[in-house]
Image (cartoon, grey):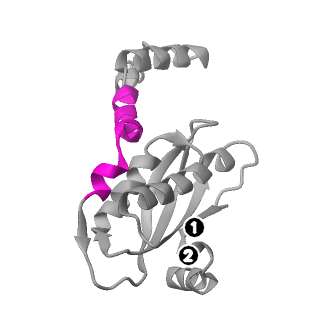
Amino acid sequence: MDTEKIKTAVKLFLEGIGEDPQREGLIETPDRVARMCEEIYGGLSGSAQEHLSKQFSVDNNEIILEKDITFYSTCEHHLLPFYGKAHIAYIPNGKVVGLSKLARAVEVYARRPQIQEQLTGQIADALEKYIAPQGIMVMIEAEHMCMTMRGIKKPGSKTVTYAVRGCLAEDTDKQKMFMEMLR
């Protein structure tokens, strides 16, 4: 990440909106924003593989659900936050990953500028690629600040996206079970 470019861009942005970047309250803002970017866009240099490669053998191949994984991301269209909960279910194929590893995989993809629909698919694709389960379901529920604080201004509205892979794509009973488990 090029922090000097970020600092320069923030100074230009402040000038562009009519602010004085040398004003007392803003003098350190370019520095703060550069540090913030390292944190909230850190997923650009991360890989889900590093988190999902630590696996454990299991005899039981029943559905596993990790729900209510809080995440924060940034809309690539407006550079405003969207945030919410991710829910991940999978049917192992003899191997499982630690539950925290699912949350870490969500973080890798959430910490990038993008759209929710893409985020949902990236998580499902990473699970399919790195843990090769029999089936996967990912649901994300999020509130988008681009709808809340600008444009249509509808706070509280949520966008729900869903991705399904493997044997669960055709198994409507398991999909219903997933939805029931989320309640």
Q: Amino acid at mark 2?
A: Leu
Q: Residue 80 appears at what percent x and percent y?
A: 57, 40
**What residue do we see at 57% from left, 67% from top?**
164
Disc 1 crowd rating (10 Å Cα; few below 14, some 14-19, many 20+) is: many
Residue of label 1: 164
Front-most of residues 25 and 183? 183
Q: Secondary structure at mark 2?
A: helix
Q: Residue 21 appears at what percent x and percent y?
A: 46, 15
**What residue do we see at 44% from left, 13% from top?**
8
Q: Are marks 2 and 1 in contact (CB under 8 Å)?
A: yes
Looking at the image, residue 97 sits to the left or right of residue 118; the answer is: left
Front-most of residues 40 and 64? 64
**Picture quadrant of residue 97:** bottom left
Q: Amino acid at mark 1?
A: Val
Q: Is residue 171 above or below residue 66?
A: below
Q: Secondary structure at mark 1?
A: strand
Q: Which mark is residue 168?
A: 2
Q: Is residue 100 above or below residue 11?
A: below
Q: For residue 177: magenta?
A: no
Q: Which residues are magenta?
A: 32-53
Give the tally of numbered discs. 2
Q: Is residue 42 above or below residue 104?
A: above
Q: Residue 17 appears at what percent x and percent y?
A: 61, 19
